[in-house]
Each structure stands twice: as C-alpha cells, then as structure tokens.
Image (cartoon, grey):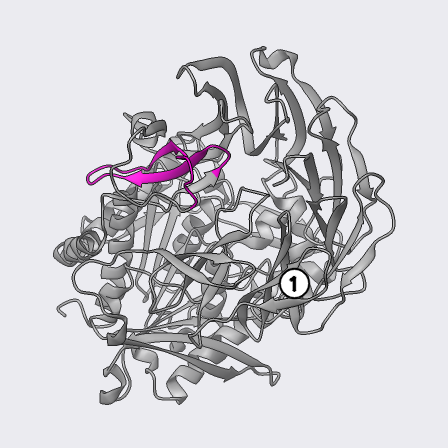
Amino acid sequence: MPGTVSPVTTETPDSPPTVRQVPSERTFHGDTVHDEYAWLADKDHQATTAYLEAENAWTDKATAHLAGLRDQVFQEIKSRTQETDLSVPTRKGNYWYYTRTVEGKQYGIHCRVPVQPGETAPPMADDKPGEEILLDGNALAEGKEFFALGTFDVSPDGNWLAYSTDFGGDERFTLRVKNLLTGEILVDEVPETFYGTAWSADDSTLFYITVDDAWRPNRVWRHTIGKAATDDVVVYEESDERFWVGVELTRSEKFIVIDTQSKVTSEVRIIPSETPTAEPVLVAPRQQGVEYNVEHHGHRFLILHNRDAEDFALAYTSADAPGDWVELIPHQPGTRLESVDAFARHIVISLRRDGLTGLRVMGDGSTDSYDMPFPEPLYSVGLAGNPEYDTGTVRIGYTSMVTPDSIYDVDLVTRQMTLRKQKPVLGGYDPADYEQFREWARAADGTSVPISIVCRKGVRDGGAAPALLYGYGSYEHSIDPYFSIARLSLLDRGVVYAIAHVRGGGEMGRHWYEDGKLLTKKNTFTDFVAVAEALVAKGWTTADRLVARGGSAGGLLMGAVANLAPRAFAGIVAQVPFVDPLTSILDPSLPLTVTEWEEWGNPIESAEVYAYMKAYSPYENVADLPYPKILAVTSLNDTRVLYHEPAKWIARLRRVAPNGTYLLKTEMGAGHAGPSGRYDAWKEESFVAAWTLDVLGLAGA
C-alpha cells in the first residue's frame, strides 16, 4: 500500500465512500488478473478499518429512514419470544441437564438437577429444586462484545465439565476444566483449541483438538486432569492438508473416536476409553472417495459408508478386531442414509428420501425396521439430545414451516410419541393462519428443482405477492423446511417466503450434491434462477417484488445470480458472502483453502478449474449491469469467509456499475455467525428484514 495516503475518501456526506484503487495483479495459467482492491485484505492497516467504518456510516445514513421499522420488527420478534424459558431436560447418568434463558439476558444458563427416585420423564416445572448452575453464559460474557462456547462436555461420572470460550468471533477457543463438585476452575487451561473434546472412562483424561496456521484442525491431544498443558501429548496428527480431525466419546462411553475427514474421504481410529494411553487402532484405511463413520453397538462397530453405495449403506465389523464389513442395510438409490445412532437395544437411522428427512428404527439383532410417520407434507425431523445408551426411548426434534420447533420422546417398542414441549410463540400465533406448499421448477437441463413455500392464508387471493427467496446449495448441506419466529414479521405483512432446494445441497440425495460442485457448480446458480422464474411463471410473485437471500456459500450464490440474472430480482441480501472464491482458493495459506479444493477444485493445478471458477466468480464478473439493490453483511473476525471478499465486491460494484444501490454492513466485533447475543442477533435480523420490506415496497405496512 503506497505511502500513508488513505485509500478511502468521502465525496460528500450524502454519498457513499469512494475507494481509491491500488494496482495489484496475479498471473495463473497465463492469465493476468488485476485486483485494484486487494489491499483490503490487510486487516491491521488503518486504511482498511477506515474503509469499513466509512461504509458502515454510509449504510447507517442510507437506512436511517428504516429506524422505526427496524425497532418495530425487533419488538415483534421480542414480543413473540418467551424470553424466560428452558429447554426440555435431557437425562445423562444421575442428572437432568437443560439450558434456561432469562428475560433481558443475552445468553443461556446451563443447569442440571438430580434425577429423583423412580423418575422416568423429564421434570418440566420452571422451578426445579436442587438446581445447579454449571455455566452462566451471561457471567462469562460480561464486559465482552462477543461470546461463544466451543465445547460443553460433562465427564461420564458427572464431576467435571470441559468447556471452551471464544471472545473474538474467530472460532479460536480457550479450553478450561471446572470441578462440578466444588465449583473450582482448574489451572488446566489450553488456548487456541478447536471444537470437540472426549473424556476417558475414569474422567482422568481429556482429549482435545488444535489447529494449524491455516485454521485446520490437525492434532488430537491427550491431557491429564490437574496437570499443566505443557505436559499434554499429541495422540494423532494429520499431515494431509485436505483433512480435518475430530474427536468424540461414543454414546456407550466405551471408545474414543478420532475421525479424519476430507470433503470426499474419511478414516477412523478408536481408543478404548478405559485405556486412554493406548495407541489408536485404525478401523479401515482411507480410500480416496470413500466416506465412512463409526458408531459403537455392543460387540460391533456400525459402519455407515458410501463404498460402492452413492446414497450410503450400513454395515458392521467386530469391535474387538475391526476387519471386513458385513452388510446390514444395503444401498438403496434414492434413499440417502445420513447418520446412524446406536442404543443398547435399537439402532436409529437418519435418512432422506424424496426431499424430506426421516427416521428408521431397527431392533437389536434384527433386520426388521419401521419408519416413523409424520403428518405434514413438508417437515424436518431428527434426533435431538440422546446421550443415554441403555434406553428404549429416544428424543426427536420436529418442525415445519408452520409448526414451531417441537420435542418428542418416542418409545421405540410401542412407537408412541409423547410431546414434551413445543416452542412457545406468544401473541396468539395460530398455525392454521398459514399454509405451506411444495412447488417445482424446471432447470435449464430439465432437472426438477423442489421449492418449499410458506405464506399467510389469503395472500395469493390478490394475485402475485411480494416474496423472499432463500438459497444455499453447497457441501451437501440441506435447507430443510423450518419454523422461524422472525419470519412471521414478513409473512404477516403479506410476504411469501420460499426456499430453493438447489443442486449442491443434499435435499435429493448424494447425486444432488455431486451435480452442484466442482465442474458442475454452475448448476447451483442456474437452478436458483430457474426457481425465481418459476415463482413468477406460477403467479406467486413478480421480478420487481422478489428479494433473494443467502449466506456464506449461499452468499456466493447471491453474487453469481446477480451477474447471471440481474433483472430477476428487486433486491439481494448477501450475508458473509463467499464472493471472491477464485482469489481465496488460489491462496493455500488462507484458512480452509486446501480442504476446499475437493469442493470447488484446485485452480492452481488445473487450468480448466481456474477458467471455470473465474467464469462464475461474482467479483471477477462484475459488469455494468442493471443490478438489483444489494445489501452485503459481513464480520471483521470471520475465519470462514474473510471480510474483505464482500468489501472488495461492493467497492467494485460501485465503480463498474455506478447506477446501482449497494450497501455494506460490517460487524466489527463478530465472526461468521454474526452477533453472538440473542438480542443482538434479533437486531441484526430486524435490520435485514426492514431493508427487505423497504425493497418490496412494504416499509409502511
């Protein structure tokens, strides 16, 4: 960066910041790219901070007229939320564990109470005699701008708590151990740790993870309680930069599991929890393109895998001497097996079929099974908080676009479902006032793309309505139908809310993911445009009353469709958007880059990948187009998508397509997920909702 000249100027108080260009270029495969805003990657330079603060000031000014609406939406979210509340207690050993929230407090309070003699159902009364506060997030966060927990792990005997904290938003945690009998925080403190811990059977040993310079979790450590971290031992280190490591204790509490995964390949090692100093035993060596995970079940390890099984199959091998895999559930194309959970007398398989999630139950020693039935045409279901191994009851979470989050206990023998709690929605919410639909769009190559839609009843009676279309489409991550209190502020103003289940996600099985990654990535973007066009063609909305929204890899989607079909949308919300993917994936020193090559391709080694990525990269393809209004939201301490990607994108949009309206909002003390406190998160959502309503012409509604 030349001299001390600030690259940021402001023409007048009534115009957005003007960012000076600083010459910078790179050359790959004979292609030279000029990046006039590359200097913004220098996070520590005062000019970078000046630019971000100037953009924030401009965004504040440009949205000042929405202050009243923002406050109104915030109050709506707040008034519909039961602020003093608690989760359904979950049994582990001799205690019921739960989290409660208190009105006016940002963070949850983690608690437990002893199980009373003969007590089989969770105690649901708000006032619980004998309550013990394990960790108060509000006390930990006092005086901090940001707070997040990385791990919260109670030892098998219930006497110790391992927990880790992040006060910056960069997902680098400090690990601590608390004596739950005395309340003492031990001197055992380990900085710069990652998510995930595991206890030994006798609670003497704690396993944890650290990251390398590129923020890749690469080492599993063994720590002896009561000793200094300098005495800790590396149990496993992964040298292949494509792979991440994880560690956990099996539900049976018999084995420590060390799993090593790239985007397409995995490998698992196990350590008996009773002998934590033993060398890890390999379950099966890695084979490129084969993914598997391990669940302990009695004398065997259950193996969920995709070896010659695109949508995965279930097998098992001996727990005493892992070897050959014996088939238990064969591969069935179109039924994606996503995870397996073992209990003493049952196995529960989480699956996906026809775009919907499901749960299958198998009895121990039997291949007989049944699928749990659910009443709505659109819904999401999954296991929720089941730490006990020896049980005949499992807890599930259920929701739909009209049904608030619901917790059920299911008797695996009688199949009876008992509702333990449904998330309260205050203010007289009635699901009968809303309706949900499944529509389909036809992609350019003939593929049918599912759409989930929710709206208030009667909205369609007047013809096309204002609409918000959400999308993601990467990493086989599915955006399943879900309930949102915040969304009600849009629905009650007549907005139709739709989710585009585009390729690159996992909604329709593994092939859906494979058809939206690497050299088929553009399908993700063209699918989304096809969905937008279908909503218009089917009379749901019109292009001038449609806002698109996505975050992270979904933010890449937003940037790409802005270039592909700028006239298809009235506005675009891009949150922590991955809009400069080529620059990031070309730099192996950045967090995540090497591990991402199996998702996006390696443009350093392949000229074909380089050209393909450059052809869809939002930043590379900014042109003088009639862009819709764009709001980009980012965080300074984001490790996953660096803040400078949206900052550069907005700067280039403003220069190349000066007739558009572009706003950049940067959280100066947060990470990838944005503000950490619940009230701060509601304010952020209110900001986005108010901007969206303004674009849709509903700011006065």
Q: Depth check: 507 or 366 in front?
A: 366
Left of 622 or right of it: where is 216? right
With respect to residue 349, does 245 lie above or below?
above
Q: Quadrant of residue 290?
A: bottom right
**Residue 289, how many percent across, how many down?**
77, 56
**Residue 201, how many percent across, how many down?**
64, 27
Residue at horizontal 29%, vertical 54%? Answer: 685
Q: Tell me if residue 113 is in the magenta stretch.
A: yes
Q: Which residues are magenta?
A: 92-120
Q: Depth check: 97 or 163 in front?
A: 97
Q: Quadrant of the C terminus?
A: bottom left
Residue at horizontal 31%, vertical 39%? Answer: 100
Q: Quadrant of residue 523?
A: bottom right
**Residue 203, how many percent across, how many down?**
59, 22
Q: Depth check: 178 or 685 in front?
A: 178
Q: Tell me if residue 306 is in the magenta stretch.
A: no
**Residue 89, how many percent across, how many down?**
39, 43
With respect to residue 291, does 174 lie above or below?
above
Left of 96 or right of it: where is 9? left
Q: What residue is shown with label 1?
A: 337
Amino acid at the residue labelled 1:
Leu
For mark 1, give the secondary structure: strand
Q: Quadrant of residue 65?
A: bottom left
- Whether residue 507 is visible to the viewer of this picture, yes or no, is yes
